Image: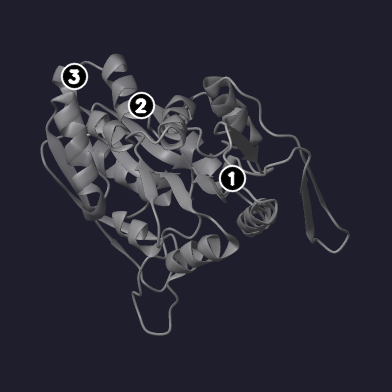
């Protein structure tokens, strides 16, 4: 006989960057493990240093980092951590990105523009990532930018089930804030057994984050409207859509979004809006959550942990997709 046989078992290790460690701790609790202790700090000139305090040799490593503000620092830290795991002889590296940075730059609208979402995928792969696990990408096509497995999880069951428990479904109307969200809103409508409406809008191509709302397509008068979106950044789009619904006779408006980016004037806009409740998941840390009593944050940790376990045990992540359809 030639060669050497080993009797070693597979080993799962969970790592976290500094962007959103609370979510990583929740996922670790769901898995019944601890987050690997890591020494991370910034040099005086802003460069990042990372060293893991446990050996990762031969382990299936899951590295969690949500791309939150300062977003470029969060991304760079994740790339450095991937490189460290690759050089530590990790058996596999799965990058968990609850919020995928630059996802809105997924195509060229005009000449001389980048496709930054594709660049992000190239950076992760070049650094050494074998697989990406993410939640509610801005567009499904981003999965094709990465030359390897991408597990795309959905927050719809978590958000929709919460809303369904809070509102009389007989009065409920699901509303898409624009044409791009219609498919997602249609899934909501199927799950909640509610009619669908659409807010037609047009962006100013010369001014970022500025939207002009035109009209509401569908019956919303006297209804409790649930606006569904993948993210809320400055809040301008969603608040304008809510105003259009109220102007068309909506009784109440609830806003749901997977990613509560909430940058710039978002906090003031949400506070001054007539919307009764904003429901987010914890894919990002929610700034000012304690100051805004109309914000509700739901956890994605159980869903992410189940996906991690399926990947580690060579199970079917598709089974999770089927349940969430």
Q: Nearer the viewer, mark 1 or mark 3?
A: 1
Q: Write down the residue under mark 3.
A: 169
Label 3: which secondary element: helix
Q: Residue 191 location, x and y as percent?
A: 18, 27
Q: Residue 133 location, x and y as percent?
A: 44, 45
Q: Residues within 10 Å of mark 1 (few under 14, many from 20)?
A: many
Q: Residue 209 location, x and y as percent?
A: 43, 60
Q: Write down the residue under mark 1.
A: 65
Q: Nearer the viewer, mark 2 or mark 1?
A: 1
Question: Quick check: marks 2 and 3 in contact, CB under 8 Å?
Answer: no
Of residues 160 and 211, the one nearer the viewer is 160
Q: Write down the residue under mark 2.
A: 158
Q: Quadrant of residue 316?
A: top left
Q: Residues within 10 Å of mark 3 (few under 14, many from 20)?
A: some
Give the CA distance from mark 1 to mark 3.
36 Å
Label 2: which secondary element: helix
Task: Work out which quarter of the rendered image holds the C terminus and state it.
Answer: top left
Q: Residue at x 55, y 66 (%)?
A: 126
Of residues 272 and 206, the one nearer the viewer is 206
Mark 2 vs mark 3: which is more N-terminal?
A: 2
């Amino acid at each position: 006989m030639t060669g050497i046989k080993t009797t070693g078992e597979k080993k799962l290790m969970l790592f976290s960057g500094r962007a959103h460690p609370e979510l990583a701790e929740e996922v670790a609790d769901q898995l019944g493990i601890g987050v690997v202790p890591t020494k991370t700090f910034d040099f005086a000139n802003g460069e990042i240093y990372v060293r893991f305090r446990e050996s990762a040799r031969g382990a299936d490593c899951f590295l969690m980092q949500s791309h939150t503000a300062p977003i470029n620092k969060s991304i760079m830290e994740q790339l450095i951590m991937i490189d460290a795991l690759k050089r530590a002889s990790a058996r596999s590296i799965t990058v968990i990105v609850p919020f995928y940075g630059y996802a809105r730059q997924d195509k060229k609208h005009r000449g001389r523009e980048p496709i930054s979402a594709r660049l992000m995928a190239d950076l992760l792969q070049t650094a050494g990532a074998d697989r990406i696990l993410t939640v509610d990408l801005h567009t499904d096509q981003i999965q094709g930018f990465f030359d390897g497995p991408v597990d795309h999880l959905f927050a719809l069951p978590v958000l929709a089930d919460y809303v369904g428990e809070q509102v009389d479904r007989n009065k409920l109307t699901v509303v898409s804030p624009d044409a791009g969200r219609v498919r997602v809103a249609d899934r909501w409508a199927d799950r909640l057994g509610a009619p669908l409406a659409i807010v037609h809008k047009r962006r100013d191509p010369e001014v970022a984050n500025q939207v002009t709302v035109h009209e509401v397509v569908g019956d919303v008068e006297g209804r409790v409207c649930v606006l569904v979106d993948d993210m809320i950044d400055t809040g301008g789009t969603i608040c304008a859509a809510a105003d259009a619904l109220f102007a068309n006779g909506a009784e109440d408006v609830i806003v749901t979004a997977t990613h509560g980016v909430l940058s710039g004037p978002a906090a003031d806009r949400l506070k001054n809006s007539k919307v009764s409740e904003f429901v987010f998941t914890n894919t990002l840390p929610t700034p000012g959550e304690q100051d805004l009593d109309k914000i509700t944050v739901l956890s994605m940790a159980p869903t992410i942990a189940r996906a991690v376990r399926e990947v580690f045990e060579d199970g079917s992540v598709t089974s999770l997709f089927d349940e969430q359809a």
